[in-house]
Image (spheres, rainbow, N blue to C red):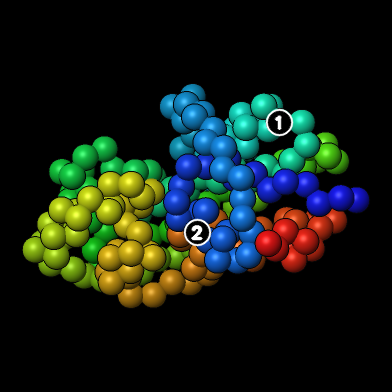
Amino acid sequence: MGVPTFVLASASPARRRLLQNAGIEPVVRQSDFDESQVQLSDPVPLVETLALRKAQTVANQLSDALVLGCDSVLSVGGEIHGKPANPEEAIARWQQMRGTVGVLYTGHALIDLSQDKTLVRCGITKVYFANVSDHAIAAYVATREPLNCAGCFALEGRGGLFVEKLEGCHSNVIGLSLPLLRQMLSELGYDVTDFWQ
């Protein structure tokens, strides 16, 4: 079995960097899937469905590749959050999140066109947020970093300063779980080292 081209169905720079740092240089193909088509209130089926639809949208344009789609949401107090719509929403969200524990869900969909196989999994990580001040929240939102992130923070950026600890996979919080990806590749008959550049 040959090694297919690894395609990332996401424009997320954080996901691309995670793969590159792990030795995988993905071909990036943004899916442009309209996420508003999926309305689910349970976070696991929501992120799994969104990840699958993103991967399928890109896979339909290709003949032979391994396509990875991902989607993340944060649940705080039973409420699901994606990216904040504007700075005001980001500030309000942080005021709600500080001093609490959130759960970050990342859906992973891997479509192997050469074998006509699809795997869908969800990575789950608990995030303990620091009890940060209004001043720190305003300063953080002013950087605009949280506006591009599900959950309103970037663990690998300034937002990492406001996270006390994690329970579970840390790369899952950044956008994709590297251990979960390794397991999924193994299920499809690949070794993750097959994709090293």
In the image, 146: left or right of 6?
left
Residue 62 numbered tag: 1
Q: Position of residue 178 (x, y in %)?
A: 61, 63
Q: Nearer the viewer, residue 137 or 113?
A: 113
Mark 1 or 2 closer to N-term?
Answer: 2
For image coordinates 46% across by 38% down, the residue present is: 41
Instruction: Give the amino acid type for the residue marked by disc 1 in the picture.
Output: Leu
- Secondary structure under tag 2 reads helix
Amino acid identity at mark 2: Arg
Residue 176 picture location, percent across and down: 54, 56
Tell me if residue 176 comes above or below residue 167 in the rendering. Answer: above
Residue found at the very far right of the displayed protein: 1
Q: Above or below — where is 23 with respect to 61?
A: below
Q: CA distance from mark 1 to mark 2?
A: 23 Å
Question: Callout 1: helix, strand or loop?
Answer: loop
Q: Residues within 10 Å of mark 2 (few under 14, many from 20)?
A: some
Q: Nearer the viewer, residue 130 or 170?
A: 170
Give x and y (percent) for residue 154: 35, 59
How many numbered tags mark residues here? 2
Which quarter of the picture shows residue 141? bottom left
Comparing 163 with 54, the one in front is 54
Which residue is rendered at x = 61% and y = 50% of the image? 26
The reply to whether the C-beta atoms of the residues labelled 1 and 2 are less than 8 Å apart is no
- Give how far across and how far down residue 117 sits, in percent: 80, 40
Kindly identify the residue that appears in the image at 51 percent across and 28 percent down. 33
Q: Which residue is mark 2?
A: 17
Q: Residue furthest left?
A: 135
Residue 172 visible from this viewpoint: no
